[in-house]
Amino acid sequence: AKAAGGNTYRFFTPEMNLRISERVTLENNLRRALYGDEIFVHYQPQTDVRNGRLIGFEALVRWQHPELGNIPPTRFIPVAEESSLIYQVGERVLREACQQNRHWQDLGLPPVVVAVNLSAVQLRLPDLPQRVARILAETGLDARWLELEITESAFIHDTERIIDVLQQLRAIGIKLSVDDFGTGYSSLGYLKRLPFDRIKIDQSFVRDLPDGSDDVAIVRAIIAIAASLQKEVIAEGVEQEAQSEFLLQLGCELMQGYHFGKPASAASAEALLRGMAQQ
Ligand code: C2E
Ligand code: CA
Ligand code: CA
Ligand code: CA
């Protein structure tokens, strides 16, 4: 950028330059990281609170950079989505999660569903169902142990085509859940038409429970919608016993959050499965 003297118009402010170069640096780092083992998966337990049983895990991508340290997915997923690196990140996570789950089954541990996040960008790939089917075949995981989490906002555009892709995924036997429910441009009309199994109540509505009368009303409504559509409902971001008790009273039986376990390594997840096998 030119010095802003006299009549000179400065197109990029220094702050903008910094942000752009930061973004490019992140993108280049990510491209390189995909060749090594800086990118891996953590697993967070999902629990049936009625009996305390572990029902599965959500797979969450992690990036441990040798110099920059841990880079959170909220920072690098958007960059990956803008640069088409998301396809590689997504396939990497999907393959690792399926491989891991199959490995646990091979060890004779109780079978569980692993839920993998799917970016809206990935959902627009016309051959997504074939790609997912190939990864299942390569890893030897039966489709019924895989769930895909798709954020509500992914359904706004191209709804017809997306419904078609979702139907193909479901035909393979994969479970589908609507992530971050209530935060997007919810329309109950589209919900009825989408082929999915489960709704995830966004953590922003869970945070202030059991206080926060708006949140109570919203959570109540979401649970009622799920029941009337005969879908499962799971609450995320459950951090406290009081939240858990309240949700259970409202009829939400499946939960995920720090109260039940933080996202942790595959080894930690395996320890939970071993504990469950001994029960
Ligand atoms: P998300 O799918 O809504 O995932 C839940 C996030 O909430 C995770 O953050 C998780 O660590 C965090 N969380 C879980 N329990 C609690 C709790 O009790 N309290 C609080 N405050 N937070 C909790 P994380 O791992 O940083 O991921 C953030 C977001 O990044 C995810 O939100 C998802 O949108 C995206 N993401 C993560 N992994 C992947 C991936 O493999 N692919 C794609 N496309 N996106 C991913
Ligand atoms: Ca998710
Ligand atoms: Ca979520
Ligand atoms: Ca989220």
Image (cartoon, rainbow, N blue to C red):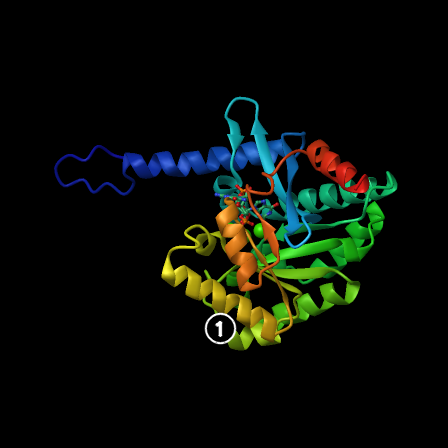
> In the picture shown, does residue 12 fall above or below 64?
below
Alpha-carbon neighbours of circle 1 within 10 Å: few (<14), some, or many (≥20)? few
Q: Residue at x 23, y 40 (%)?
A: 10
Q: What residue do we see at 60% from left, 71% from top?
A: 227
Q: Hey, which quadrant is residue 215 in on the image?
A: bottom left
Reply above or below: 155 against 180. Answer: below
Residue 169 in view, yes or no: yes
Identity, as a three-letter code, of the amino acid under mark 1: Ser
The percent coordinates of residue 275 (x first, y second) are 76, 37
Along the viewing direction, whichever of 250 and 224 lies nearer the viewer: 250
Residue 81 rendering spot, x and y as whole percentages: 54, 49
Closer to us: 83 or 258: 258
The image shows residue 12 at horizontal and vertical percentages of: 29, 40
Q: Is residue 249 left or right of residue 115?
A: left
Question: Viewer-proximal residue, 162 or 141?
Answer: 141
SS class of the residue under badge 1? Answer: loop
Count of numbered badges drawn on the protein? 1
In-front residue for pair 277/183: 277
Q: Pinpoint residue 279: horizontal percent, then vertical percent.
A: 79, 42
Seen at 61% across and 32% down, the residue is: 33
Q: Quadrant of ligand 1?
A: top right
Q: Which residue is mark 1?
A: 187
Figure quadrant of the N terminus: top left
